Amino acid sequence: MTMPTFPVPVLDQLSRAIFQACGASEQEAAIVAEHLVTSCLMGIESHGLMRIPQYVELVQEQAIRPRSNMVIEEETVTTAVVDCALNFGPVGAIRALEVAMDKAHRQRVSCVVTRRCNHAGRLGAYPQRAAENGFITLAFCNSPPHGHFVLPWGGRQARLATNPISYAIPSLPHPILADFSTAVVPEGKVRLYHNQGRPLPKGWIVDAQGHPSTNTADFYAPTMGAILPFGGEMGHRGYALSLLVEIMGGMLAGYEMTLERPGNGVAFIVIDVEAFLPSDRFAEMVEDMKRYVKSSPPAEGFEEVLLPGELEFRLREKRLREGIPLDEVTWKQIKKTAAALGVKLP
Amino acid sequence: MTMPTFPVPVLDQLSRAIFQACGASEQEAAIVAEHLVTSCLMGIESHGLMRIPQYVELVQEQAIRPRSNMVIEEETVTTAVVDCALNFGPVGAIRALEVAMDKAHRQRVSCVVTRRCNHAGRLGAYPQRAAENGFITLAFCNSPPHGHFVLPWGGRQARLATNPISYAIPSLPHPILADFSTAVVPEGKVRLYHNQGRPLPKGWIVDAQGHPSTNTADFYAPTMGAILPFGGEMGHRGYALSLLVEIMGGMLAGYEMTLERPGNGVAFIVIDVEAFLPSDRFAEMVEDMKRYVKSSPPAEGFEEVLLPGELEFRLREKRLREGIPLDEVTWKQIKKTAAALGVKLP
């Protein structure tokens, strides 16, 4: 089945119009639209345009508050807590990133975290943008208890969210970009298998009693199952990374781990490469690294050694030329949302 | 077979005496002895007292240069490159950590990397010390090409070192401390199996042709095999973390990845908790996290949910009381080294 594809400007325009129609400023609408379109371009559909109906609904429930006044709290020369005031998640997280980049530009290193940040979307979007501005960035994103789907190592009841980590390194034609969950998989992936009626690969989940399972129904049972931390037999490492995400994304903003609340907690560490060496020299070194790593002959089943993010950036190129495919369900939902807001379809 | 055990002060004294006898200052000898003894206390024998003969040999070859003059280069208010001048690895890395803590104390966040740092030993030692001083610290440690035992994801020839990552979080009675390789295992662990003539678990190594193997001889063949990146079927994540270690530990110090040289490259990101919230409030939150995570009932085969580092700190308590066990080979080698330097045995 081929999906209908849409030119990028069409989807971008439509998304902006929808978000403006539900109360976002022109600038806010542009940020959210760009976030969702880019996620689709890079193949991360789960954080792409399928979120439009959800975000609009949240605005109508006043859980997302367009045009809210975001303020910087607990500020020092190198650090800040940005109160995102329940604005759209990407608007809040971009604001925090801008504060972090500004501080790193002035002071060389910064650490900025968010308060009251809504669903931040694709975490990699933020380090990616910072890398395009010459910064090395580490990013962490936690979720409050309602997102605690993941086992602590050695336990059989979930206590952690899927807590992704991302980093990006400046490079041309695009950054080196890693973005992954500290759980085996994000919950959305389990849901995808569930909706498709497919069994899960081994090693992804346990049932409510903590027994390994490949049945998605065990995960979504009335007493829920749980996702394993990343790392298989060495899952204590994924668990350790997950706790780091919790501390950076939650605690530094003043949130106890057990405190229920909406949205995500995002944290950025931003480093100015130029504090250490000229950026053109750094760029040469990164090229040396790329060449060296890629000179490893491919393993069976692989065509080449890739850098983190390379596949996604290739897909972006392709989709920029050929358009973004959307499945029928998503497209129907977007059309319905647009119609309800009186937004004309392209 | 029970191993002879030795009281901590005896081993500490002996180690100091040996290092001073081969040229270290009193302070340098104390730092290296403390590093090796603590590694043994915490059960990380591979970075413990078995290193004494190796370090002394390296001093005699002038590869380690006691009393060398370490200097700060490329300094900004928040960043520095510390030239460790080929002093003992722990002496150089502790110096870099001190610079990083001083900057984080003044500016709230810092990032410090090393140049000409010898074998840094147990990476977790540094974040551990910083956490005891109230700082959150992330640490990265790379190795030059002679340590490239690890496959890049999708490749069949090694291009990366085992590149550990560590972090520590202030907490009482001891920090939360994670310290692990971004490869499935450090090379030393493969060597241990090799020396014991045991087959490796599946999923650790490939032979020179890139085929999975459990035979340590395939790893140590004339054309060497390679260790897999951490993560099993999701080894692209371990690979991505490894590249981050390479960039932080190597490139920011000005070293190309392909440049052969001795020692390790260590990088620290240090964050002052007090920039975000009072440290006693943070401590309460960490306690809340510990309670919550530990309230997950144990999975089959586990007695309880532990925090990163907890087992190692328990072992430290036990060995502080009962002494440090040393195997016969290690003890014999240490005695031989001491005798050659004219150091009296306890």
Image: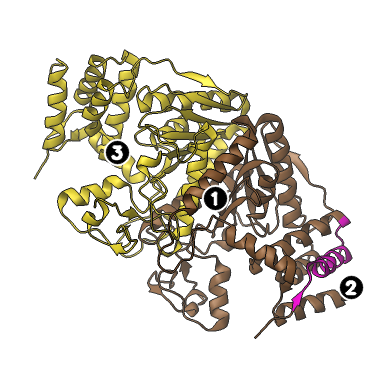
Chain colours: A yellow, B brown
| Image: A327 above or below B202 | above
Image quarter where the C terminus of chain B lies is bottom right
Figure quadrant of residue B72: top right
* Disc 3 element: loop
In screen coordinates, is B149 left or right of B84? left
Q: Residue at x 61, y 27 (%)?
A: A78
Sequence-earlier tag: 1 or 2: 1
Is residue B24 covered in magenta?
yes
* Magenta part of the chain: B5-26
Residue on which the image places disc 1: B246
Percent across and percent down for residue A6 are 16, 30
Q: Residue furthest bottom?
A: B1
What chain does mark 1 sit on? B
Percent across and percent down for residue A3 are 12, 39
Figure quadrant of residue B136: top right
In screen coordinates, is A325 left or right of B25? left
Residue on which the image places disc 3: A42
